[in-house]
Image (spheres, coloured by chain):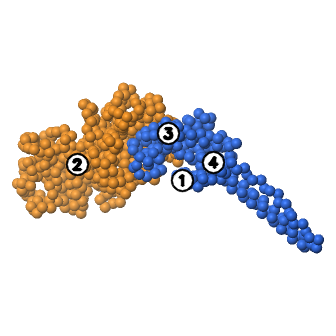
Amino acid sequence: MTFRAQRLLVLGVLVFAAAPACRKKQPESAPTPVSNNTPPETCDQRCRDSIAAADAKRRQDSIAAATAAATEARNRAAAAMRATLGEKVFFDYDQSMLTDESRLALDRKLPILRANAALRLRISGHCDERGSDEYNIALGQRRAAAVKRYLMDQGIDAGRLDIVSFGEEQPAVQGGTEDAFAQNRRAEFEITAGGENLTAPR
Amino acid sequence: MRFSTVRVLCLTIVMCGAARGARAQDTTFKQGVQLTLRYAPGTRPGIVVLPISGPHGDSLRAILQRDFDYGDRITIIPTDLPTVAAAAASDGLTINYPLFAKLGAAGLVQVTWSSDAVARVAVHNVSQQKVERTQDFPLAGDPNGEGGAQEWRLSVHAMADELESWITAVRGIAATRILYSSGGRIWQIDSDGANSTPLSGAAMAMSPSWHPRGSHVAYSAMGGTGNWQVILREAGGATRSLSATPGGQNITPVFSPDGTTLVYSHARESGNDLYAVNPFMPDAVRKITVGRGSDNMSPTFSPDGRQLAFTTNRTGRPEVYISDADGTNAELLTSFGGDQSYNSNPDWSPDGRAIAYQSQVAGRFQVITIGLRDRSPKRLTSDGINEDPSWAPDSRHIVFTSNRAGTPQLFVLDVESGRTRQLTHSAVKVRTGDWSLHLKR
């Protein structure tokens, strides 16, 4: 699961730059190739066949290119949606209350969750290393529960949201600095179902 | 009582001398040490363990000496000095008591073999120049056997504990083991640092806890679904997960002193409460705390089973509370005040007098004990980050996690003298230690 989460993150980073551009782009429809190869007067059957074959090939290539472009655009859009779903939210020290910034990050997930009813998320709560190991398992649970409650309040069905707590067991960043602590006090999101054919929100 | 004449003599000497002042600041002076002579530091009687014959004599002697040393109530007089070696070389019939007396020995431990697996132990009172007590100790297991070596060592530790009670009137703590978590597994280790053995497979497991008779171990582990479960493990190795409150989070289990109740922390979604259940028969689960969304965890029983101490953030910050075992009459035990206050992971001493816990001091956890009579906290550690204290059955030693030597490991502290030794030496982080009661007598 960690590995999946990491992969999601990496994908997210890779695609993020391209994301705003491709979200606006409509999938290109395959253009109908028009042949301007009018056969010359002297063209015999062999000659005409050859021209027709060339036209057919050109048409096929064009359709393939358009399909590939459409698939790529769809993949890019799906990756961008997955990145948005996987965007982490962060917490203050020993707190499970959502910050304004966390709410904005959760709001960005809402249209995708609404457009894809089969989507299920696992929300995992994490803590920095300063607290007690045992207390942090409960704190991580409270963080994940706070995220779940917010999404439910926005109309997402509770059955689509599982929560777990890793306490301080899986830090995102190693180290004992304030910055590392801040990055480790987080909730992460893993798509557990319905992530294959994501529909873009309208 | 057995060495009453000597005690009168030695008490006088110790009380008058500077020895008492040399003891650690957090000492409560206890009478009852019998064999001290003037050469012994503090109130620790000097003991010579005479060389032991037979194929396992050397290892038996080494274990006894180490156990006495780790008990911190006896001073082992080394016999590698030529004079001691000469005195110790006597055949047991002609013991040179005056020479041992000069070396500071109050007593001698002499082990011979009654049969192959039965050690005959005589404890000599040096000042009275006589054998004070003799007993045969059958040693279980086989020092060379694959599985029998652990059992043999435990028998030797139990013998050391008994001898320590002859000499000091307080039973030793050698025949005990400490549970801990490391690398996601639960482990056990002998009190002297030998035989570290994994008890669970690789998973995310922590907070192990002994059944009072050593027959079971309970711990929390993350299951395949991502939920934390309480796992019960029998001594033989069979495990099952506790199903009293399925789903959600089930952590920090602890047995009651009579062994019939398991108290643990459960959260369905948000807010952990303590629950009690009999883990050995179908039983209705009882909710103990009413947290109303706060977290309540890390329980510990008073030795009479009537009260609990636990961590709760019901007033905002994590603090240690005490309540009756049914959750009523909860009151704040710790209070260092302020928004930065963080007190957690209590462990009730087996004599019932104190609770050890961890408290953040300048952002770092330190081990603190608080006396239940006067409620005055005493800080025991300062070097590095120190957490997860657990008392030994003598209510004098504490095992805890510390990063003072790098990667967090378990250390054992003698609360009276301040003497500390490192218990585990693992390449990876070691934590949440739990010290057993006596596993063999």
**Residue A134 sits above or below residue B409 on the image:** above
Say which quarter of the image contains residue B291: top left
Rendered image: mark on residue A81 = 4
Horizontal side, residue B395 vs residue B1: left or right: right
| Residue A110 can be seen in this image | yes
Name the front one of labels 4 and 2.
4
Q: Mark 4, chain letter?
A: A
Q: Secondary structure at mark 3?
A: helix
On the same chain, marks 2 and 1? The answer is: no
Q: Amino acid at mark 3?
A: Arg
Q: Amino acid at mark 4?
A: Met
Q: Amino acid at mark 1?
A: Gln
Q: Which residue is mark 3?
A: A143
**Residue B240 sits above or below residue B293 on the image:** below
CA gap, disc 4 to disc 1?
16 Å
CA gap, disc 4 to disc 2?
59 Å
